[in-house]
Amino acid sequence: MPSDAAIAALKSSLRGELIQPTDPNYDDARKLYNAMHDKRPRLIAAVADVADVIRCVNFARDEKMIVAIQGGGHNAGGLGSVDDGLVIKLSRMKGIRVDPEARTVRVEGGCTWGDVDHATHAFGFAVPAGIISTTGVGGLALGGGLGHLTRGYGLTIDNILEVDVVLADGRFVTANAKKNSDLFWAVRGGGGNFGVVTSFLFRLHPVHTYYAGPILWDLSEAAEVMKWWHKFLTKAPKELTGFFMFLTVPPGPPFPQHLHLKKMCAVAWCYSGPLKSAEKVFKPIRAFKKPALDLVGPIPHPVWNSMFDGLYPPGHQWYWKADFVKDLSDEAIALHVKHGSELPTMQSTMHMYPIDGVASKVKADATPWGYRDARFAEVIVGVDPDPGNKDKLVAWARDYWNALHPHNLPGAYVNFMMADEGDDRIKATYGKNYKKIVAIKKKYDKNNLFRVNQNIKA
Ligand SMILES: Cc1cc2nc3c(=O)[nH]c(=O)nc-3n(C[C@H](O)[C@H](O)[C@H](O)COP(=O)(O)OP(=O)(O)OC[C@H]3O[C@@H](n4cnc5c(N)ncnc54)[C@H](O)[C@@H]3O)c2cc1C
């Protein structure tokens, strides 16, 4: 542990705030989105700028402290914090600059996707990311990034043009296709393994108001819906995506009272092509089967992208299990229906996100994300506000995953994993790209300073 004098020197050198266990705001500052984690860092550096980040990285390395990087603090595995270590908390670094002519946006490491949506929407643009606005840009963008715009515009990593990084030796470097291109390759899927990304440059797409919303069907129709949905998407335009889910209907608007708390299945659609074509695109969807509820219509991107925020406020218990999926056999669908019908709590769910379309056109070795041939990213999510329900969530998610995993691919999306998956699973996730990512880790962080992540061991 660093001496009091070293901590005092660190504190006085920062423009941001150094928060310690005796400080009144410590308990607030250490909170993670997933309340299943109750970590107690020795120091939390709420950094203000790149200079603060450099100072903290040098401090952690020289003092041999374990260090965690925190973007939005949303990671389900709690990888944005660490017991007894130093947390580099980026949430005060919120600068964003849209360049409408170049169609790019420069985003600092402490932004959430809500911040990005807000800034870019004013110019009529969007960056492809997730389905909720409170997630941090850092963790999501460095792990992959999938959501409403993946089929039409690729994963978030496919839209990163450049990053600024503070490396383990304290150097600040820029990485893009021409400069430090090995590092640029590795950060697009390798998570926080290579350094602290202080800013991202993203490509923008002309996405403003699209045609989106959920369509819900009775649970008894889930097998039929799943079969139809996964076949239908193979022929659907790339601008159309729709993730399948099992859900318990939330007891409030916009859902009608007769559906409240009913277990159902749904597809959350998003068509980002021309609005005038939307009705036509949805004709076969609406012809498939009369749904219990159809809430699809024109909606601005930031509104649809924050639609789940209210259902999932910070401070709940979360336990996730995930896989990549190549195809859905009838047997796999039957297992999904069995386990998806047993959601243990109101907020628990299973989402299956399409990751084909534009995302599948990128070469498997162009980034560490090796599963360009997977059609879906599946995530089984146990959620509840009550810590007393933790075991129930974990047991359900594990049972569900154990039943389906033999039907799925060996790896999973790193951002849908807890922290307990083990090295073999990480290897399986990077697949043929694992050797290359290990070599780059060796070059940039051979002593594994940055190890509070889905760790790549040099
Ligand atoms: C409710 C909810 C919805 C979600 N929806 C989606 C979705 O639609 N699509 C999707 O792709 N994912 C989704 N996720 C998963 C999400 O991508 C991960 O949880 C991600 O880790 C969150 O990023 P963060 O910055 O908030 O995480 P944090 O907890 O802050 O950090 C997580 C990890 O990222 C690394 N990291 C973060 N910022 C930086 C940085 N600037 N430099 C270097 N390393 C950094 C850290 O090392 C840490 O290991 C969702 C998560 C939640 C909880």
Image: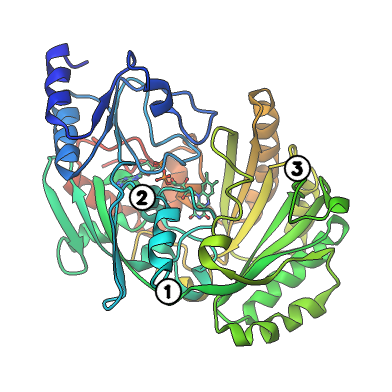
Task: Indicate the position of residue 167 as horizontal and vertical percent values.
Answer: 17, 45
Kindly identify the amino acid type of the residue bearing the numbered disc 3. Leu
Q: Residue at x 88, y 57 (%)?
A: 220
Mark 2 element type: loop
Extreme residue toward the front, this view: 122
SS at mark 3 in the image = loop
* Residue at which label 1 appears: 124
Crowd tier of the residue under label 2, counting other residues whose Cα lies within 10 Å: few below 14, some 14–19, many 20 or above? many
- Relative depth, front residue between 168 and 291: 291
- Residue tagged by mark 3? 343
Number of marks drawn: 3
Question: Can you tell me whether the CB of the residue at mark 1 lies under 8 Å from the nearest atom of ligand 1?
Answer: no
Q: Earlier in the sequence, mark 1 or mark 2?
A: 2
Label 3 neighbour load within 10 Å: few <14, some 14-19, many 20+: many
Residue at x-position 59% and y-position 37%: 319
Label 2, on which residue?
Answer: 111
Question: Compared to 333, does 446 lie above or below?
Answer: above
Using the rendered image of the protein, determine whether residue 38 is visible from the camera's viewpoint. yes
